[in-house]
Image (cartoon, grey):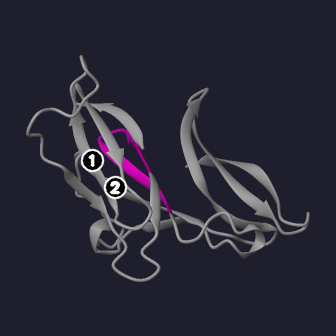
Amino acid sequence: MAVVQADGRLWMTFGPYWTGIRMVELDPGTGKAVEDAPVHHLATRPDEPYAVEGPEIVEHGRHSYRFASYDACCAGVNSTYKIKAGRSASVTGPYVDGDGTPMPEGGGDLLLAGHGEYVGTGGRSVFKDRGSDWLAYHYYDAEDEGTPKIGLNRLK
């Protein structure tokens, strides 16, 4: 789950591992969903293993970017976790990849996947520091008996 303020409104993204990611507008006074607010569908996995979680939305310039973790986490060096992203002109979507495929239809540009000793890269957070955007994430170190560690990459 993540909360973002955009266009003067408050939004919450949420979604369980198996059924996709959704978004609803929140009442800033109560923190509850706005009565009768539509639930926006932001991402789904149309193929097995269906796993997508950890929604986060970041506004940058004229666009909103949606980040999420895909595939299997928490299995040490057997983890297949990876991070995908999509872009939209509206905080409520649709979020699409570079080819224009909507994320609810399986789209999403691969941002980071396991490589070398970095296995199961996911569970990320995006933040700004000193004018730069950063991606923090966890991974399992294949060269250190699968010890969980934190990675930090500058986004460009």
Q: Residue at x 54, y 42 (%)?
A: 126
Q: Nearer the viewer, residue 135 or 51?
A: 51
Does dot 1 land on a helix, a strand or a loop?
Answer: strand
Does dot 2 land on a helix, a strand or a loop?
Answer: strand
- 18 above or below 25? below
Mark 1 Cα shell of 10 Å, populated few (<14), some (14-19), many (≥20) = many
Location of residue 108 in the rendering, given as x and y in whole percent from the top left corner:
40, 67
Q: Residue at x 34, y 55 (%)?
A: 87
Does the segment drawn in magenta span residue 132?
A: no
Q: Residue at x 32, y 39 (%)?
A: 12
Q: CA distance from mark 2 to mark 1?
A: 15 Å
**Furthest residue toward top:** 29
Residue at which label 2 appears: 87
Query: What span is colored magenta in the figure?
Result: 55-69
Q: Is residue 102 visible?
A: no
**Furthest residue toward bottom:** 48
Q: Nearer the viewer, residue 52 or 105?
A: 52
